[in-house]
Each structure stands twice: as structure tokens, then as C-alpha cells.
Image (cartoon, rainbow, N blue to C red):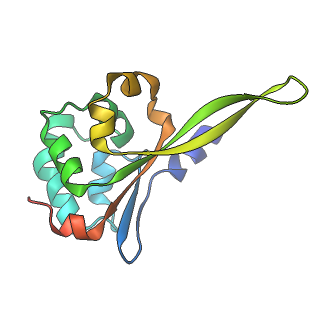
Amino acid sequence: MTTIGNENDFKFVLQDFSNIYIGMRMTYKEMAEAEDTPQRLKTAIYMYVLPETGEDMRVCEHVLTMTPESRAFEVFKQLKGKFKVMTPIAVKGRRGNVRVEYKEQLYTVGDIVNSPELKEHLKPEYIMEYKFSKLHLAALAV
């Protein structure tokens, strides 16, 4: 029961004055049909991403299977955004007990796609959101 709530926590498209934030648990179809998704991004999804992935692939899964030759990689590269990744780290306390803490790290799409050891270490549930600038979205060549 808690997994359904947790999954929906990371299905969002938010905007502030200069940035757009996308939750990584969304499928590309959900992202393309969301009201808050900018039209230019919807066009890029329909033209370049959906033909190579399909509608039901989640963004967090696709990032880990993406190749440098794919057209979706070029779209993410042009957006020049960062993926927010929360990695669990086991920390030993003073009394010898081990607890899990989470460390936030930011990666570009090039960091993830071009690093096999990072791809091997990351799991789809560690990737939380993708943040990119509205200025880079306006400059996106679609």
C-alpha cells in the first residue's frame, strides 16, 4: 500500500520562474499528457523519445538504458539539466549500530550514460528528479 503513494510522490512536472522539474517515476506517456508539461518538451517527447522507447517506459529506467547514439540522449544533452540522485550510504554509529543515510548527488545525462560503473551502481529508484532551465528548453532544436 505504501509503494503506490511513494510512486505517485515522484510523478510531477513543476515550474518556477526559470526552471522545470520532472519527477522520474513518470512514464513518457504520462509526461506528454500532463497539463504542466511545456509544449516544446511534449513535441520533443513525441518526435524523438517515444519512437525509441515506447509509451510505458519510465524516465528513470530509460536514463540507465540510454546510449550515446540515441536521439533521446541528444534531447537530454541539449536541455543541459541535472538528475537528482539519492544514494543510500551505510553509516556506523557510536554504539556500533548501522543506519542508512542518503546522500544527494547531481549528475548530467552524459555522466550517467558515459560511465558504465555509475550505471551499474545506480538503480532506477535512486533517481528522483530532472531539473533543467526554461532557457535551454527554448533553445531546444526540435
Q: Residue at point 33% right, 67% down?
A: 35
State the image quarter where residue 13 is shown. bottom left
State the residue lying farthest toward the front.
94
Looking at this view, is 23 or 46 the one in front? 23
Q: Residue furthest right?
A: 95
Kindly give the residue lying farthest to the bottom in the view shown. Answer: 17
- Residue 99 rendering spot, x and y as whole percentages: 76, 30
* Rendered residue at 83%/30% (across/down): 93
Q: Nearer the viewer, residue 26 or 22?
A: 22
Decide if residue 22 is on the left or right side of residue 71: right
On screen, 107 above or below 132? above
In the rendered view, tell whether residue 11 sits above or below residue 56: below
How many numbered tags mark residues here?
Answer: 0
Instruction: Look at the image and tell me in which quarter the C terminus lies.
Output: bottom left
List x then y, in percent, for residue 52.
15, 36
Determine which quarter of the picture holds residue 103. Answer: top right
Quarter residue 108 falls in: top left
Quadrant into which the N terminus falls: top right
Q: Let me know if residue 62 appears in the view.
A: no
Identified at 34% across, 68% down, the residue is 36
Residue sitting nearer the eye, 90 or 60: 90
Query: Left or right: where does residue 132 sit relative to residue 47?
Result: right
Q: x, y (%) of residue 102?
A: 63, 39
Above or below: residue 90 compared with residue 48: above
